Image (cartoon, grey):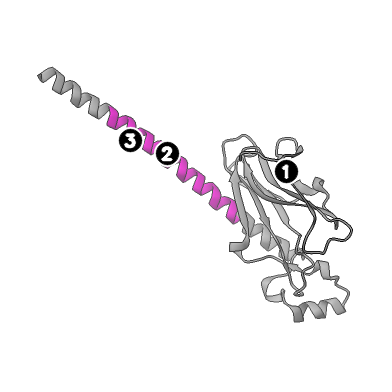
Amino acid sequence: MKVAKIFNIYTFFFVLIIALSFITKKNAELYSENESKKKIQIKFQKWTFEAIHNKKFFAKDSCNYLYIEQKIENGLTVIDAIGIPTYNEIKFSYSHFNNDNKIDALITFTPYQCDGSNASMWKQIQLLAISKNENYIIDENYFEFLQSNDLCFYLLDSSSTNYVYGKQYMFLNNDPHCCPSISKEIRISTRNKKLEFYKSLKR
């Protein structure tokens, strides 16, 4: 009986140590992942400041009809009158894109149309935040190969390891601006930029 009791005690502590090791490892992974997400968000904020400074977007205090009207009188075209939306309208989809076991992100948002029109209704800014050493870079040109235009465009919405997902939309001749007739689901490989169309795919 005494031997069995000692064996049970050793077994209990062995199982306890294994469980604590597992919990510690999971907590460390979660902490690392949360730290990576913070770095991505900070890098994106820096990107927005630089984009506004470089006049790619209007700042919040100048993204309004009266200010834009003055600019239009001086030669600004309506499609240029875009601003960055509030932070809760920015979508971050976190995943792994470059096989270094560090979190990356697809970042998307629809810019504000500062003149109050719906000219940018179907416009989407699409960015990749990619880990590089201990920091991140924001790639704003990655999705240029999609070549969106007035009749065909792509909206991205989510990601998984080495893929981003979304839809291709196409307008037919008589479609109103609100309602393209054709939509197809797509996925894009972040390894080789291969675009695939599919009917149903588990994400």
- Evaluate if marks 1 and 2 touch, with contact meaning CB atoms under 8 Å apart: no
Looking at the image, tell me whether mark 1 or mark 2 is earlier in sequence order.
Answer: 2
Q: Quadrant of the N terminus?
A: top left
Q: Amino acid at mark 3?
A: Leu
The quadrant where residue 194 appears: top right
Q: Nearer the viewer, residue 40 or 116?
A: 116
**How busy is the neighbourhood of tag 2: few (under 14 within 10 Å), some, or many (20 plus)?**
few
Give the CA separation, mark 1 to mark 2.
Answer: 33 Å
Looking at the image, tell me whether mark 3 or mark 2 is earlier in sequence order.
Answer: 3
Decide if residue 141 is on the left or right side of residue 200.
right
Task: Give the residue at mark 3.
Answer: 20
Q: Where residue 19 sits: x, y (%)?
A: 33, 33
Task: Give the residue at mark 2.
Answer: 26
Q: Amino acid at mark 2?
A: Lys
> Quick check: 158 above or below 60?
above
Decide if residue 121 is on the left or right side of residue 103.
right
- Asked if the stretch drawn in magenta spans residue 171, the answer is no
**How busy is the neighbourhood of tag 1: few (under 14 within 10 Å), some, or many (20 plus)?**
many
Decide if residue 40 is on the left or right side of residue 64.
left
Q: Nearer the viewer, mark 1 or mark 2?
A: 1
Give the CA separation, mark 3 to mark 2.
Answer: 10 Å
* Residue in view at x 74 percent, y 72 percent: 114
Task: Give the residue at mark 1.
Answer: 186
**Which portion, as a residue range, is magenta?**
15-42
Q: Where residue 182 sits: x, y (%)?
A: 79, 51
